[in-house]
Amino acid sequence: MRFRLFLLILLVNIAHSANFHVEPKYITTGNDFNQLCADDCPVLNYGLISTNDLWVQHIINTNVLSVFGSVGGENSPQDLLYKEFAKIGQPTDKQLTDFLKQSELNIIQTHQELINNNPNQHSPLIDISARPNYLGHQGDLELFSISEFYQVGDMVGTGSINYFVFDMIESRQLTLDDILLPDTKEKLENMVKEKFFNALKKGKVDIRKHEKKWSFFLTKNFIFTKDGIKFLYQPEQITPYNMGMPEFVIGYADLKNIVKPEYLK
């Protein structure tokens, strides 16, 4: 019997300046998957967080649950359900539970339709996950990632990791533009591009042939690490699928006069 997996990632309860705490948020929908789909259940694997800063909690949890929004396609019941849910500023536990309960029912129905239309394919035909991870803090910044996997029908499953940087003093999520000094993005892009080309050369990839098919760009997906700022690319953004998720770290010493000094402390 195949069970649907309801996973809540165990997050380390660490304080930021003695007042930031994060822990798993437990939600039970009451749906009985044994009765609803028995041996033909979709695989749904997700985790939610609870923090004493509700705006952080809302951003992370909304992004976790967005992975379920596209199941069924544009304007499907699940798509419309997620769009309405996303409009809620800070959902109550009841609103969150109601959304998750109906989402599970919608996805089970979509999964059954896929099985009926593809009788020769093995179940599950829906396998999706979204898992938040607390990466700690640096100065006044709290750092998170969300790891996702998405496979529906006969499509090839794809994974991704998205980073989130929260400025706890200004109470906002930071974008790459927020941390850069004026007129420095091109210089930063060239630094990351140089590391990328060096990696291609090391892998004995013909750069001219590669550039004809894959265009380089500066990703907005970044995170602060102990060694510098890491830039992570999703599969098939700047390289073929079999090259995974390229990542490049620019050391803090090299980021002087590029990144605002308050973020280089």
Image (spheres, rainbow, N blue to C red):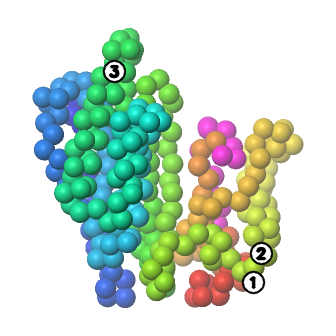
Q: Residue furthest right?
A: 208
User: Where is residue 111 shown, x and y percent of the image?
Assistant: 33, 27
Q: Which residues are magenta?
A: 237-249
Looking at the image, residue 250 lies above or below residue 115 = below
Q: Are marks 3 and 1 in contact (CB under 8 Å)?
A: no
What residue is at 75 percent from the left and 70 percent from the top?
185
Q: CA distance from mark 1 to mark 2?
A: 8 Å
**What residue is disc 1 on?**
257
User: Where is residue 255 shown, x and y percent of the image?
Assistant: 70, 78
User: Where is residue 216 shown, x and y percent of the image?
Assistant: 76, 51
The answer to whether residue 148 is visible is yes
Q: CA distance from mark 3 to mark 1?
A: 56 Å
**In which quadrant of the rendered view does residue 220 lie?**
bottom right
- Tell me the kind of residue under disc 1: Asn
Q: Nearer the viewer, residue 237 or 55?
A: 55
What residue is at 31 percent from the left and 54 percent from the top?
47
- Tell me the kind of residue under disc 2: Thr
Q: CA distance from mark 2 to mark 3?
A: 51 Å
